Image: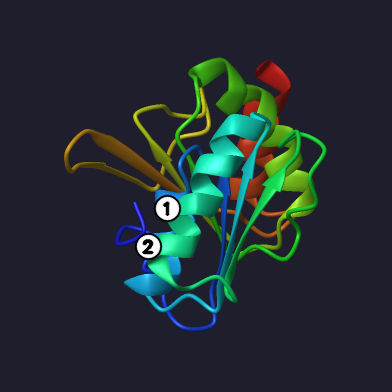
Amino acid sequence: MLKVAKVGAGDVVYDLGSGDGRIPIMAVQKYNAAHAVGIDINPDRIAEAEANLKAAGVGDRVRFLNEDLFEAKISDATVVTLYLLPSLNLKLLPKLLTELKPGTRIVSHAFDMGSWKPQQTLSAGGTVYFWTIPAKGTPEYEAAAAAAKQN
């Protein structure tokens, strides 16, 4: 997922529904992201992620938040990763379009965003979907906004 998003220095990676924390940790460790944030509503998963973070030794650049991803502030993200159920992806789409800056990259493992067509669909240990948040007022934005309303 991180390779598909071309994560690199300067990127701020948010993993929504971060589980054990492997994506934010890897974003910093392997792809040199400036920092990464994992958000999960389950406190047990956050505890597991914190333990994995401690073992990884990159704690100053990764943090985990025990929050509802629909309420979390994500506007500083340059990359958002998702491995959520299809219904959650669809429910999340309006938030992504509203809060993220144009050019922000979104990668979803296994599940798409309904009628918002991905820019890329890859098979790499499962299906990975890739989108970029379009600028408001463009045909691409209008298509994404229409998909958000349908869902």
Dot 1 crowding, Cα within 10 Å, few <14, some 14–19, many 20+: many
**Marks 2 and 1, how far apart in space?**
5 Å
Residue at position x 65%, y 17% in the image: 151
Residue 110 at x, y percent in the picture: 34, 29
Q: Is residue 84 above or below residue 50?
A: above
Image coordinates for residue 48, horizontal then vertical, percent: 50, 42
Q: Amino acid at mark 1?
A: Ile
Q: Give the secondary structure at mark 1.
A: helix
Classify residue 14 as left or right of residue 5: right
Density class for disc 2 (Cα within 10 Å; few <14, some 14-19, many ≥20) is: some
Whole-percent x, y for residue 37 in the image: 61, 58
Question: Which of the two residues, 21 or 98, is positioned nearer the viewer here?
Answer: 21
**Residue at the limit of the structure toward the bottom, as seen here:** 9
Depth check: 141 or 124 in front?
Answer: 124
Residues at discs 2 and 1 in contact (Cβ within 8 Å): yes
Where does label 2 land, which residue? 26
Secondary structure beneath label 2: helix
Residue at position x 73%, y 54% in the image: 74
Name the residue tied to disc 1. Answer: 23
Question: Which residue type does callout 2 highlight?
Answer: Met
Residue at 59% of width from left, 31% of height from top?
44
Residue in the image at 30% along x and 62% along y: 3
